[in-house]
Amino acid sequence: MANTYGDWLRQQREAAGLTQQELAERAVMTRSHIAHIEAGRRMPSREDARRLDKALNTGNVLSSFLPEEEVAVPDYFEAARQFEQQAVMIREFALSFVPGILQTAGYARSVLGMSFPRVSDEECDRRLVTRLERAKILDDPVTPAVWALLDEAVLRRQIGGPEIMAEQLKHLVRLGESGRIQVHLLPFTLGVHPLLSNMLTLMWFEDQPPVAYAEGLRMGKIHDVPSVVQDLQHRYDWALGNALPLKESLALLRATARDYERHD
């Protein structure tokens, strides 16, 4: 008997004589997403599990044995969360705070605690667990490739206090120094840039067209029309071209973290 859900899926796939790519094509999923599930790094959504059952002729076994998800995200973000789990490249732009998959637990708790109307401590905990689970996509050392383009306001806006800010910025430095992410900062001196009005996530996949996700106050939208996605990619590229290089961005993150530690 398999020890994990991923092991069991692999056994069923191999018993059916399918490669990961062949199963991906039958289940309308990406091969990399199936590889992550089999390795135990990710779990399929309920809909993914139903398609896997159909592709493998396993009735509803994969759906039935899927652990109950404790997903606590706004309804408008759910589609983006599922795309995020399948992406092979993610490019984030953040205007006000660190993107969710790059947040430390302390920083994430502080952000979630700002909810309006205020939520209970129990609900805040549920949302925190979901956010930290999303960050586990970075446990894979290669996929997805992640770029973080941050407005300088992200560094200067003190969320959770100096200690939490120092910890968060040092976390970004570690990810950048290790090569796990590319991080670039848009300094205040740049002035206006084409991403000032939105938080933006661009996502690419192994075998489906790219999408973009833009979010505002209590709303978010997936863009999959090619011309719109391309326009948003061009805006991102324009802003990235005016950002500080990686080395200078990491230096500014380190210096700002030290400032917070001295203030603390």
Image (spheres, rainbow, N blue to C red):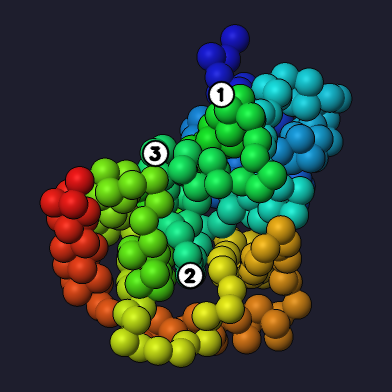
Q: Nearer the viewer, residue 24 or 234?
A: 234
Residue at 84% over, 24% down: 60
Q: Amino acid at mark 1?
A: Asp
Residue at 19% over, 74% down: 248
Q: Nearer the viewer, residue 46 or 248?
A: 248
The CA span between labels 3 and 2 is 20 Å
Residue 249 drawn at (x, y percent): 24, 71
Q: Quadrant of the N terminus?
A: top right
The CA span between labels 3 and 1 is 33 Å
Residue hosting label 1:
7
Please, is residue 72 above or below residue 252 in the view? above
* Residue 20 in view in this figure: no
Query: What is the quadrant of residue 10 in the picture?
Result: top right
- Is 44 on the left or on the right of 166, as rendered? right
Q: Secondary structure at mark 1?
A: helix
Residue 178 drawn at (x, y percent): 23, 53
Q: Amino acid at mark 2?
A: Leu
Query: What is the quadrant of residue 98 in the picture?
Result: bottom left
Q: List the single residue furthest toward the top.
A: 1
Residue 156 drawn at (x, y percent): 33, 65
Residue 259: give its label.
none
- Mark 2 and mark 1 lie on one chain; the one further toward the N terminus is 1
Residue hosting label 2:
95
* Residue 247 in view in this figure: yes
Label 3 or label 1, whichever lies nearer to me, is 3
Q: Residues within 10 Å of mark 1 (few under 14, many from 20)?
A: some
